[in-house]
Image: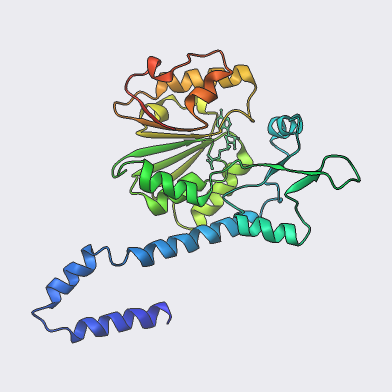
Amino acid sequence: MDLGSAQRSVLELLGAVSPGDLPALLDWMRTTRDFDEFIHDNNDIILKNIAEDLRNCLPLETMLSSEQVAIQKIKQQPQPIIHIDAFLYDDDFIDSLCEKGKMSRNYCMVCGSHQTAPLRFISHSFSPLELKFIYQHVLPDLSGKVLIDVGSRLGPVLFVGYLYSSALQLHGVEMNQDFCQLQEMIIAKYKFADRIKVHHANICTQASLLQNADVVIMNNVFEYFLDRSEQARAWEYISHNVRKKGSLLVTVPSLKESLSNLQVCQYFGFLNPNCSFFI
Ligand SMILES: C[S@@+](CC[C@H](N)C(=O)[O-])C[C@H]1O[C@@H](n2cnc3c(N)ncnc32)[C@H](O)[C@@H]1O
């Protein structure tokens, strides 16, 4: 049934309800959770469509020539790594690529032999499942709150936040212009601009945005993209500016692990007692 016919059917049904029961029915329609299933199913379809739109604009490995630092760092790893974006490609999709011979989950350890080892996969995005878990089970109700995704890349944190949370504002800060343009494309197509804003900037220039944040998300944001001294500087900048009372910081990997190789304060909370951490 198309939208017009569905709307006519709903109006017809409402016209058939006895006048005494109509206010209670309308109230139920406004407040019931019985529609959640339909709304969430539709949100999942929107996320799948967004992923398809982005896949059509990007190479399979979802890395761009404009991110040479990250490409070089991945090449320097001792074991081969496959980069596959968890927001764009789920496990079924990867299996189908392997079946078609376009990807492998293993690599040959001795060229020409049958000795193989599993390849390490990394993703530069959260998967939809991880993000739904964060919004539905980790974070509190975000009504009236301001969330920042540091290094928003393709925008999944923002898009899932728009569909699955009541956050008032969702800000993405991304230093790579190509990725900012892709996020803008999705925001315009899916009409997300009333709550999502993308800033093409280094996070180390965004003091007032950080100071106003209720939630700051940081998913593997610096490790592959900045050298060690830049990483240390960025962490210190964040620790000095995320200071709103009750603000929450969500980091992957844990804060301890993120800071352990850098010469910065080992315990972030030491610098900023206003902030809590979910790791
Ligand atoms: C691993 S991705 C995070 C993706 C996304 N937040 C998610 O969770 O799905 C890290 C992103 O951070 C960006 N980035 C790294 N350092 C940054 C900085 N100092 N300021 C802004 N963006 C940065 C990189 O360009 C990259 O796109």
Q: Nearer the viewer, residue 180 or 90?
A: 90
Q: Is residue 56 visible?
A: no
Q: Position of residue 236 (x, y in %)?
A: 48, 18
- What is the quadrant of the N terminus in the image? bottom left
Q: Can residue 38 be seen in this view?
A: yes
Q: Residue most toward the right?
A: 112
Q: Looking at the image, in which quadrant does ligand 1 appear?
A: top right
Q: Which of 137 and 177 is in front in this view?
A: 137
Q: Where is residue 66 in the image (x, y as percent from the top left)?
A: 70, 37
Give the mark count.
Answer: 0
Left or right: where does residue 196 sit relative to residue 69? left
Q: Where is residue 111 in the image (x, y as percent from the top left)?
A: 89, 42
- What is the quadrant of the C terminus in the image? top left
Task: Write the residue at 57% across / 56% down.
Answer: 51
**Location of residue 102 (image quadrant):** bottom right
What is the basis of the colouring in this image? rainbow
Q: Nearer the viewer, residue 201 or 258?
A: 258
The answer to whether residue 47 is above or below residue 5 is above
Task: Write the residue at 12% across / 84% down.
Answer: 18
Left or right: where does residue 118 sit relative to residue 123? right
**Location of residue 83 (image quadrant):** top right
Q: Where is residue 271 in the image (x, y as percent from the top left)?
A: 39, 15
Task: Write the residue at 32% across / 22% down.
Answer: 274
